[in-house]
Amino acid sequence: NTIAQPSGTVNALSRFTSDKLAASLDWNDVSVFDFKAQGALERTFNTKVIQNSCLALSQDASLLLVGEISGNAGVWDLSRRSRICALEGGTEKLLHIAVNATSNRIAALDRDGTLWQWQTLTTHTNPGEMQLLRAHSQKKPKRPEEHYTEEFAYRIPRSLCDLSANTA
């Protein structure tokens, strides 16, 4: 199944969630795919987000989060097929974004190592309306005093990889 058109570039890929997968193609095309029988993919959602850098689906695959090179992000309600939140406050390229729908919290990590957090409202917007949320806290990482300052051959600084355990 070829999904990346026209250049073939896939710059971000979400985890599998409820038989869905989100992909960022050619740095501006964001799509959500459903897995069908025999491994076939069906595109169920598509939008343009210029210079996106990361994406994620909520655990129930009802929300799509897209981070941008600018440090901002957006949230789409996939059932309504519309953008419901604009997230501002970040200053560097977002490398990873995540949502906890139970606590209405969104977090993103930028390339500088800063953790940005947004608290979403518990009430949903009316169709056609969008919330504008500013980051309410940031945590810049500090190295422990015993941290080595030398670079090691096996260390990958500013890696774009998500090295988390398989939770399936």
Image: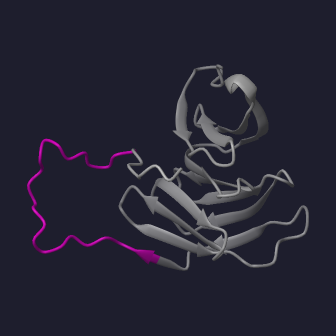
The foreground one among 26 and 43 is 43
Quadrant that contains the N terminus: top right
Magenta-drawn stretch contains 61? no
Residue positioned 64% across, 48% down in the render: 17
Q: Main secondary structure of the magenta part?
A: loop
Q: Is residue 43 left or right of residue 57?
A: right
The color scheme shown is one colour
How many numbered discs?
0
Q: Is residue 71 visible?
A: no
Across and down, in percent, residue 164 comes to 41, 52
Residue positioned 63% across, 43% down in the render: 50
Q: Is residue 127 left or right of residue 2?
A: right
* Quarter residue 65 falls in: bottom right
Residue positioned 75% across, 79% down in the render: 122
Across and down, in percent, residue 154 comes to 17, 43
Which span is picked out in magenta?
138-160
Across and down, in percent, residue 10 comes to 55, 31
Residue positioned 67% across, 69% down in the render: 101
Q: Is residue 53 above or below residue 89?
A: above
* Quarter residue 24 falls in: top right
Q: Is residue 145 left or right of residue 14?
A: left
Across and down, in percent, residue 58 comes to 65, 58
